[in-house]
Image (spheres, rainbow, N blue to C red):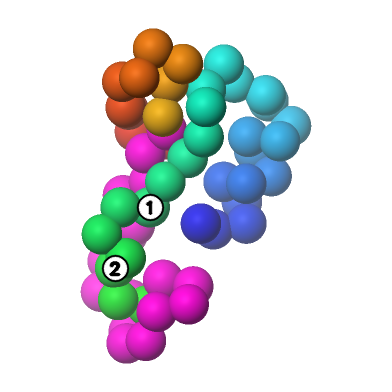
Amino acid sequence: MPIGTVKKHLTERPDIKGVTLPGMPMGSPGMSGTKEGPFEMLEIRESGGVGSV
C-alpha cells in the first residue's frame, strides 16, 4: 500500500474496515518485477462492500 494512501486514511479516519491492494501486482512493495501501471487500491467498508480508494 502506498504510504500516501496510508497517511490519508490515518488522517481522515473514514468509516471503513481497511484497505487492500488485491492481486499482489508486480512492482508493489514486497513483490518483484516492475510496476506496470497505477495500482487499484480498494477500501473494505463496514457493510462488507468494497470501493475504490
- Label 1 neighbourhood size at 10 Å, few (<14), some (14-19), many (20+)? some
Toward the viewer: 29 or 5? 29
The amino acid type, in three-letter code, at marker 1 is Leu
Whole-percent x and y of residue 3?
62, 57
Q: Is residue 30 magenta?
A: yes
Q: Is residue 46 above or below residue 25?
A: above
Q: Are marks 2 and 1 in contact (CB under 8 Å)?
A: yes
Residue matched to label 1: 21
Residue at the top extreme, as displayed: 47
Task: Name the spot of residue 29 as percent of width and height, x first.
Answer: 49, 73
Specify the segment rendered in magenta: 28-43
The stretch drawn in magenta includes residue 35: yes
Q: Residue at x 39, y 12 (%)?
A: 47
In the rendered image, which residue does mark 2 sit on? Answer: 25
Residue 6 or 38: which is nearer the viewer?
6
Query: In the rendered image, which quarter contains the C terminus?
Result: top left
Q: Position of residue 23 (x, y in %)?
A: 26, 59
Count residues near mark 2 (Cα–Cα under 10 Å), then give few for <14, some for 14-19, many for 20+.
some
Residue 10 figure quarter: top right
Tag 2: amino acid: Pro
- Residue lying furthest right in this view? 11
Query: In the image, is residue 6 above or below residue 46?
Result: below
User: For the point 68% across and 25% down, which residue is it?
Assistant: 12
